[in-house]
């Protein structure tokens, strides 16, 4: 069992319904072509610097599925059911710092995290 979160890079006119529709396309295997949004790249780099999803260091990561699913406009994270709160807080902080929307797949809620200035460790 996993706890699934997805961060999404939307343009300024993006709405929560756009995230839900994008997730449905992703589940169906339909992804937009092109290079990842710079916000997605930055989020992924910051998150995996702390919790690697590749190599030997990934053995202690909070991710059930490795490597993470990274697409042009989103990063999907399947987290262990007992994921520590500090990991969830970091994901939310990074999403806010990179101006991304969060999708809680289980609950179906879409929300913009509070914008925060995340200091890399």
Image (cartoon, rainbow, N blue to C red):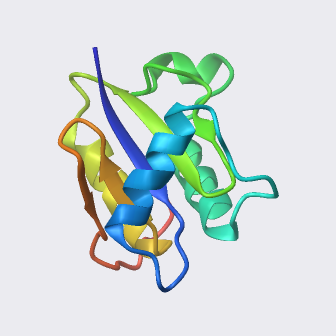
In this view, 23 is above or below 84: below
Q: Quadrant of residue 67?
A: top right
Q: Where is residue 97 in the image (x, y as percent from the top left)?
A: 44, 74
Q: Where is residue 63 in the image (x, y as percent from the top left)?
A: 44, 26
Residue situated furthest bottom in the rendering: 12
Q: Position of residue 12 (x, y in %)?
A: 50, 85
In this view, 92 is above or below 69: below
In this view, 11 is above or below 70: below
Is 118 on the left or on the right of 28, as rendered?
A: left
Q: Position of residue 57 (x, y in %)?
A: 59, 23
Q: In which quarter of the image is residue 5?
A: top left
Q: Which residue is drawn at 20% across and 42% down?
A: 85
Q: Which of 24 and 93 is in front in this view?
A: 24
Q: Residue at x 69, y 68 (%)?
A: 38
Q: Which of 44 and 28 is in front in this view?
A: 28
Q: Residue at x 55, y 79 (%)?
A: 11
Q: Quadrant of the N terminus?
A: top left
């Amino acid at each position: 069992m996993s706890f699934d979160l997805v961060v999404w890079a939307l343009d300024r006119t993006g709405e929560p319904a756009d995230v839900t529709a994008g997730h449905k396309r992703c589940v169906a295997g339909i992804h937009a072509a092109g290079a990842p949004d710079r916000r997605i790249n930055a989020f992924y780099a910051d998150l995996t610097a702390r919790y690697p999803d590749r190599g030997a260091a990934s053995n202690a990561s909070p991710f059930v599925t490795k490597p993470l699913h990274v697409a042009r406009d989103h990063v999907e994270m399947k987290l262990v059911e007992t994921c520590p709160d500090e990991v969830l807080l970091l994901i939310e902080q990074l999403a806010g710092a990179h101006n991304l929307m969060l999708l809680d797949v289980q609950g179906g809620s879409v929300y913009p995290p509070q914008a925060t200035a995340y200091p890399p460790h």
